[in-house]
Image (spheres, grey):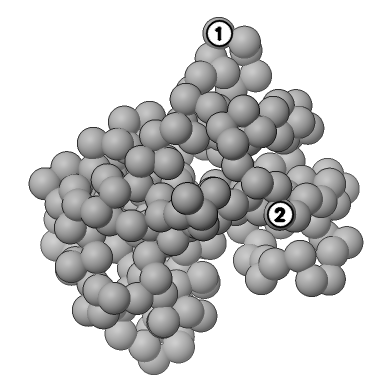
Amino acid sequence: MRIRYKPWARKELEESPFYREHPEEIIGNWRKEFKNPENPFFVELGCGKGGFISQKAVKHPENNYLAIDLVDPMLGLAKRKIEEVYKSENKEINNVILTRFDIERIFLILNENDSVDGIYINFCNPWPRGKHHKKRLTHTKQLENYKKFLKPGAKIYFKTDDNNLFDESLGYFKQAGLKLQKLTRNLEQENDFWENIETEHEKMFNEQGIEIKACILELPNE
């Protein structure tokens, strides 16, 4: 998603108590960054404007969340969204952290000591051209990187509007040895698929009549 430059974003992020500027320095120690380090730990890959992570984190104070994106303006909007949602619920922001990093190199900021319980991939770039497929956040190459910090039995939650990305991702998941727990090609029609939080993209696609595809994957327990 392209977004206009936000001159205030960098300064607000640097001053925010729930933003981390140098994530590579925290590798292996992310849990210690939270008020309750023993809580389950989840990561959102590509948090965008923060619509998902703000709602998910405020609803689940028993979990810790790390949200990653690469663009300052996007992270600035996510930071403001989190503040808005937590303020509306009269809650302290102590279970969510934002950071800026290239997800293709995520193995430089997370490792097995971080013991991540699950990751969320919401409406990632489909990279439709064949030569760019390895950039997909669901590509086998990326899945192998995630397995370096996901704990045994951890889950991957994935949803997209793109048919080709979804179908080809199912192949990537199988190749990476992930177990398919749930699958739907029309998330809006599912009553009990998961606790769905409608993102900005999802709302737009639903209004256009585009069906949302989703699945839950699980890592082997060994």
Is 194 left, or right, of 44 in this rendering?
right
Residue 151: give its label.
none
Residue 199 on image: x %, y %:
61, 58
- Identify which residue, 65 or 111, lies in the foreground: 111
> Is the residue 36 above or below the residue 49 in the image?
below
Disc 2 crowd, CA 10 A, few/some/many (<14, 14-19, 20+): few
Residue 208 on image: x %, y %:
83, 46
Residue 82 on image: x %, y %:
39, 69
Is 17 left, or right, of 114 in this rendering?
left
Check disc 1 and give the amino acid type.
Lys
Q: Are marks 2 and 1 in contact (CB under 8 Å)?
A: no
Residue visible at 29% across and 36% down in the picture: 107
* Furthest residue in direction left, as rendered: 25
Residue 131: give its label.
1
* Furthest residue in direction front, as rendered: 222
Quickly name the residue at label 2: 181
Q: Which of pointers 2 and 1 lies earlier in the amino acid sequence?
A: 1
- Residue 76 visible in the snapshot: no
> Is the residue 148 above or below the residue 95 in the image?
above
- Which marked residue is nearer to the observer: mark 2 or mark 1? 2
Check disc 2 and give the amino acid type.
Gln
What kind of element bears circle 2?
A: strand
